Image (spheres, grey):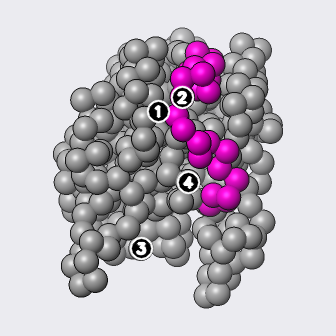
Amino acid sequence: MLAITNCTLVMKDHYIPNATILTENGKIVDFGKKLTIPDGAEILDAQGLFVGPGLIDIHTHADGDTYFHDDPVKCSDTLLRHGVTSVLPALFYSMNKQEHLDAIKKYRSAIAEGKCQNIIGVYMEGPYLNPDFGCDKEKNVWKDAIVEKDYAEVVEAAKGFAKVWCVAPEREGILDFVKYVKKEIPEIVFSVAHSEATPEQIEALMPYGLKLGTHHTNATGTLENYPEVRGVCVDETVNYNNDIYAELICDSMGVHVHPYMIRLVKKIKGQDKIILIADSFVADGPPLPGLEEAFDINFDWGGDIAGSKLTLDIACHNMMIHTGGSVCDVFKYASTNPARLLSLCDRGEIAKGNRADLVMVDYEFNVKHVILGGEQIN
């Protein structure tokens, strides 16, 4: 048994100061004030740190300098040290069919070997997105017609492993693809991504499980209905629909999402429908003029933003700065909400019987200790 003492527990909507949390056999067995610590328990003095549920990054490609599909063990370990106890590595549209199959096989094999204990599945950022959007869009290898013979093998490989599947609802033939995936993977969550779909096109897919907006306000379409009239598109649809969660990439300078826009999205979506993501990528293009100090984002050689260099703990810190939010708030955006999106009932909050995936942070969200399944990582 592990007893973490002298901590401030971060609950869904409040704190429990001067508390203790007990874990055994990988589960939370009790928590609160004035608990009796059983004889023989290992004691970890938190020295006043916040203790919250392990972070859940549903969308990231890398650990800052290495792609998951190149070295999943390295990336998994890096993220774990930053408090990410559950992660979905993201596959993307510039990967061909064989690369998709190889990556999924590599992740499954690493998990079977007892490695990458925080990888819980994959995030399918494609293949069928709008080829006019996203970094390195000239490398999109899925621009042609959507036909079953091209995607069936990928869907089969992803059964029981893919948790989120991104689509551009305006792509011709996308409904047949969505129905096929839904039949093969009933628990799948669909997300609108790299898209210029209309509200009607997006909402038509909601009955099939579309309930997420990928990197909200990034790589979304035109608003030019008339020269002087603002139209509605993907961002407005995500904001409007209460059942759709909004992913946010929260970098230090507010490049992906302007801080004012972050605060607006928070006001519209509320506390329960925001999900922070790292969306870390690997790119070595030069920074855009005026963004030379943007140390936590990438640029491609086409003059576009190419994801971030974030880990989720840094995104949480940035979110607190940009919104004035609390430690309690960002644990919700980076743990509770993604757990609810994916129907992960055993994590995402401190509760008896939940997995003992815990992260200990200070008031600026600097990670000090990580517990995975009741075992101290750092």
Residue located beneath label 2 in the image: 147
Question: Is label 1 in contact with label 3 (beta carbons under 8 Å)?
Answer: no
In this rendering, the answer to whether 186 lies above or below 18 is: above
For discs 3 and 2, the disc positioned in front in the rendered view: 2
Q: Is mark 1 on a helix, strand or loop?
A: strand
The numbered disc on residue 164 is 1
Q: Nearer the viewer, residue 54 or 164?
A: 164
Q: Nearer the viewer, residue 79 or 285?
A: 285
Mark in the foreground, 2 or 1: 2
Quadrant in which residue 25 is drawn: top right
Q: Distance between the residues labelled 4 and 2?
A: 16 Å
Residue at position x 35%, y 53% in the image: 197
- Identified by mark 3, the residue type is His
Q: Which amino acid does label 4 sit on?
A: Pro
Q: Position of residue 81 (x, y in %)?
A: 67, 42
Q: Can residue 318 be seen in this view?
A: no
The picture places residue 164, in percent across and down from the top left corner, at 47, 33
From the image, tell me which residue sits under label 3.
258
Please state which amino acid type lies under the numbered disc 2: Val
Secondary structure state at the residue bearing disc 2: loop
Between disc 2 and disc 1, whose residue precedes? 2
Verify whether residue 141 appears in magenta: yes
**Mark 4 against mark 2, which lies toward the viewer?**
2
Q: Which of marks 4 and 2 is nearer the N terminus?
A: 4
How packed mark 3 is, by other alpha carbons closer than 10 Å (few <14, some 14-19, many 20 or more), is: some
Give the secondary structure at mark 4. loop
> What is the CA distance from the residue labelled 4 to the residue labelled 3?
25 Å
The residue type indicated by label 1 comes to Val
